[in-house]
Amino acid sequence: MVIGPARVWHSWAGASATESDYDNVPAYAADTLVAPPEIVRAQLINGGDAPFPSGMLIRRILAEEVGGFEEDFRGMHDDQVFCTKLCLTQTVYAQCGSVFFYRIHPDSLCQTSISGGDYAGAKQRFLEWLDRYLKGRITTDSDLWRDLQERLWPYRHPVLHRLVRSRSRFQRKAVRLGSSAARWILPSAARGWVRQRLGRVKR
């Protein structure tokens, strides 16, 4: 199995290629063999998508072994589910350099999902599917399982997630306020100590 990244393509519509087109650089090592499940982990940790099927070259027997596409997925993430099943079981050669163009336009499935407010729900559906798919296949103390539960947490505990985010924003504001106050009030010798303490809170 071989995969290659896409060149995200805007200049077909007349935009400057140097300003709008870019290579969709993967979050895993390129020009090397990547063992499972590292591509799926990179996808979860970085919040990105699985390799595009248009940039994949696989043996038919591998597609058959994982059961092909999932019938329950139509539209968003149908290709991601298929690619994820492959990358969970197969060592992949990930090459460097774009191998195809991926056209961006406002009427695409992804763009209409984002503009219509359905993207987060589709992402949660994919993550919930992956949670069910992995049960019994991997141990609950594996890095992949922990990564997945971390990505699912905001969807399963939305109120707590909002509270944690609010607390983090409050802490950052408090750090900035404390730093400003220290510059005006404290002598220079004490300011270093305050910066050190506030830095720990910030982290």
Image: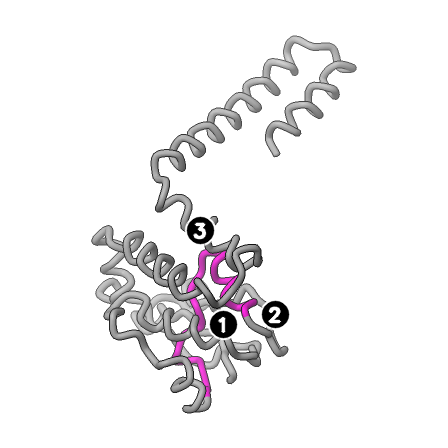
Where disc 1 sits, the SS reads helix
What residue is pinned by disc 2?
29
Of tags 2 and 1, which is closer to the observer? 1
Amino acid at circle 2: Ala
Instruction: Verify whether residue 52 appears in magenta.
Output: yes
Amino acid at circle 1: Leu
Query: Is residue 91 or residue 28 the one in the foreground?
Result: 91
Q: Residue at x 38, y 75 (%)?
A: 82
Residue 27 point in image, percent of width and height: 54, 64
Query: Is residue 176 or residue 148 the one in the foreground?
Result: 148
What residue is pinned by disc 3?
151
Image quadrant holding the C terminus, namely: top right
> What residue range appears in magenta?
37-58
Where disc 2 sits, the SS reads loop
Residue 76 point in image, percent of width and height: 28, 65
- Label 2 to label 3: alpha-carbon separation: 22 Å
Residue 88: give its label: 1
Above or below 58: residue 9: above
Labels 2 and 1: the sequence-earlier one: 2
Amino acid at circle 3: Arg
Above or below 46: residue 108: below
Image quadrant assignment for residue 154? top left
Above or below 86: residue 133: above
Image quadrant assignment for residue 126? bottom left
Query: Is residue 30 or residue 184 the one in the foreground?
Result: 30
Labels 1 and 3: the sequence-earlier one: 1
Residue 183: give its label: none
